[in-house]
Image (tube, rainbow, N blue to C red):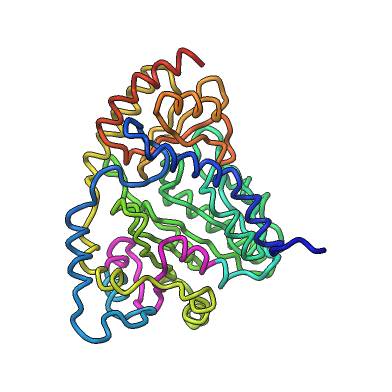
Amino acid sequence: MATVGSSRSRAAQREVALTQRFLRSANAAAKDPHGCRFTFGNPQELALPAMVDALRAAAQPLDPQWFAYKDNEAAPRAVIAEALTGELGVAVHPEDIALTAGATGAIALAFQMLAEPGDEVVIPVPGWFVYAPMLRLAGLVPVQAPLAAETFDLDLDAIAAAITPRTRIVVVNTPHNPTGRIYSRAALAELADLLDRESARNDARIFLLSDEPYRRIRFDGNGFTSPAVVYPWTVIDYSWAKVLVAPGQRLGYLALSGHMPAADSAALRELFFPTQVGMGWNFPEAVMQHAVPALENVSLDLADLQRKRDRMCAALVEYGYRVNRPEGTFYVWGAAPGGDALRFADWLADRSVHVMPGTLFERPADFRICLTATWDMIERALPVFSDAARAL
């Protein structure tokens, strides 16, 4: 008798198995009242008051259709287009924005719209651990392209080696999870030239998916260039989950580069609605859409977040850790003492300090710290990190 369940779901299961196991242990750790939680980007304090006010106001119906079915509503798209145009410096039209259930919904939409089953998608390593299972479920093939070993810059040679005639999408995540790297305009322009050459050589356009949920979380006055500025065949995904520290409120979008040729953007624009419906109504809920104008002006305290980064990085370096000082995101990436991330994470967990092992990012000797932890958690955890450096 045949195995129950689709081969695509089983492939996704294999890709996400370690993440699923770690998530279960992280959920158990969240119940520890003395735990210092540095794993996922979950809130460790009460929600931002301005976000709560925005959602409360958006939940108050102003007409009978307030909670009717919502798709890509005009009002939030207009707000997003204006803000995105100002941020990126390239015109983005409201009709070139698809509202989705978080950035994950936007990424899934891009995969469904831009590639056929069996096509390949180049993903960065280390990189977000959900790209691969999403691709498997869509019938697509993830192909890894390692980042530069020491700097975590884009490695154009590695990307070129990963591209084949079946490549349809290259994923770039900037600011980068987990390392916090922000890619320069020059590096992105070189990548754009590479994708143009490879597209011509294979007689098939390669799209670039710019994964930008941390775009507004940057340190030290660092600037930001979206690949959409330098490569016309770019689609951008974004989520408010990071800047609001509210990943449970699913609100995001997929946007087409304003430089995309008119015929291509028109064709993709027509695919938004049918693809989103076919995916299971991949739109944000009514309250989230109504809240967009107010949420555009809400953010976590970036100055406080930068102070947390500085405290963690300085202390870890003092203890002998090798860490990557992030330029953006709310993560610190480092090398695990002893070179075994799982052993390191288990040693810390036994002492109520919880970090994410780099094994989830295909880097079993590294680890990630999430700075959404409270100051109290940071100060209580630092002596444990110090002990780990000596013990391991």
Pinpoint residue 233: horizontal percent, then vertical percent. Answer: 51, 68
Left or right: residue 187 compared with residue 143: left
Q: Which residue is drawn at the image coordinates 39% and 79% (left, top)?
A: 71
Q: Which residue is drawn at the image coordinates 46% and 13% (left, top)?
A: 390
Pinpoint residue 265: horizontal percent, then vertical percent. Answer: 48, 77
Which of the two residues, 236 or 285, is positioned nearer the viewer here? 285
- Quadrant position of residue 222: top left
Q: Main secondary structure of the magenta part?
A: helix
Which of the two residues, 95 or 388, is positioned nearer the viewer here? 388
Quadrant into which the N terminus falls: bottom right
Residue 77 in view here: yes
Q: Which residue is drawn at the image coordinates 19% and 66% (left, top)?
A: 56
- Total labels drawn: 0
Give the extent of the magenta segment. Answer: 83-110
Q: Which residue is drawn at the image coordinates 68% and 70% (left, top)?
A: 203
Residue 201 in view here: no
Residue reaching furthest right? Answer: 1
Assess whether residue 149 is covered by the magenta stretch: no
Assess whether residue 88 is covered by the magenta stretch: yes
Which of the two residues, 179 or 280, is positioned nearer the viewer here? 280
Left or right: residue 81 compared with residue 20: left
Pinpoint residue 78: horizontal percent, then vertical percent. Answer: 29, 76
Which of the two residues, 192 or 84, is positioned nearer the viewer here? 84
- Quadrant position of residue 252: bottom left
Residue reaching furthest top? Answer: 390
Q: Is residue 273 above or below residue 208?
A: below
Q: Is residue 331 above or below residue 171?
A: above
Left or right: residue 351 compared with residue 11: left
Q: Is residue 70 above or below residue 29?
A: below
Left or right: residue 122 compared with residue 283: right
